[in-house]
Image: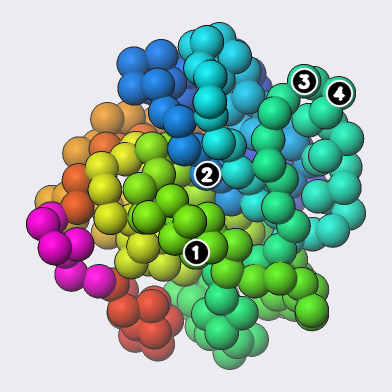
Amino acid sequence: MIATDEADKQNMKVATDSEFAQTLKRIFRERRPRRILETGTHLGTGTTRIIGEAIREAGLTGVEFISIEVNPQYASQARANTAAAGIAVDLRHGLSVPRSLLPTPEQVHQEYVERVDPSVFVDHAEQDRVKTYLAETDFPGTEDDLLGKALRAWGGRPDFVLLDSAGHMGIIEYEYALTLIKGPCTLMLDDTRHVKHAKSVARMKQDPRFTIEADSPEKFGFVAASYKPRRGGGILQRIAGVFGGRK
């Protein structure tokens, strides 16, 4: 495994002139999404800002842009940063998934210490990894299932979804989102050479409902794909199987 340090984390910020940004902006020009959902706002200066710029540059109107951030300090800073940048975003503070789907310390240790693919990036030293990952989503009393609430409010029909949450939450968000998306959309995964979404993109590439449109190694990698559910919604993924033996 390749552990990221603080310098690496600085590099995780996505530049507005990056390949990721250019790919996202092309998608917005061509498909003109109206319902846009992002997880992992962080400070609102990375992918959130790129989405805001893409909306503006494509001349989109009547857009619903929702971004989800669980850390209250980050959410507060993101609101200030997006307002200063003139980005119209409905920034929601809370957990993206139901609290019942958060992994236990044992599950995090198993998946992100014992079973980590040596070719992918992973955060934190091994002795600190479980505690530090769990702290990223440990906000008791915070509203949960914001991803589900947003998708259900749209009847399961977003136009564009970007999943970019905490490192130990990528596959959980991915599997959960697929149980709720009922119509065609574009799905982007950030950090696909990282444990966050290495497993997600591997499953995506085996799923006939997806057509991969971009698969880049830039920074920690990203993938963009079009998604077309089968009639009747397809076969729902079992969230309980994310941990405990599935590979």
Question: In the structure shown, which secondary structural element does the residue marked by tag 4 occupy?
Answer: helix
- Residue under circle 4? 84
Q: Residue 246 at what x, y percent from top left?
A: 31, 79
Q: Residue 41 at what x, y percent from top left?
A: 68, 45
Q: Residue 189 at what x, y percent from top left?
A: 44, 44
Type of amino acid at the residue the image marks with label 4: Ala
Type of amino acid at the residue the image marks with label 3: Gly
Is 187 rendered above or below residue 92?
A: above
Left or right of 147: which side holds 42? right
Type of amino acid at the residue the image marks with label 1: Gly
Asked whether 244 falls inside the magenta stretch, the response is: no
Task: Check residue 86 in the rendering and tell me which mark sits there, or answer none.
Answer: 3
Q: How many marks?
A: 4
Dot 2 or dot 4, earlier in sequence: 2
Type of amino acid at the residue the image marks with label 2: Leu
Task: Please name the residue shown 59% across and 50% down the image.
Answer: 39
**Residue segment shown in magenta:** 230-236
- Residue under circle 2? 37
- In this rendered view, identify the residue nearer to me: 206 or 31: 31
Confirm or deny contact between disc 4 and disc 3 (CB under 8 A).
yes
Displayed quadrant of residue 135: bottom right
Mark 2 surroundings: few (<14), some (14-19) or many (≥20) residues within 10 A: many
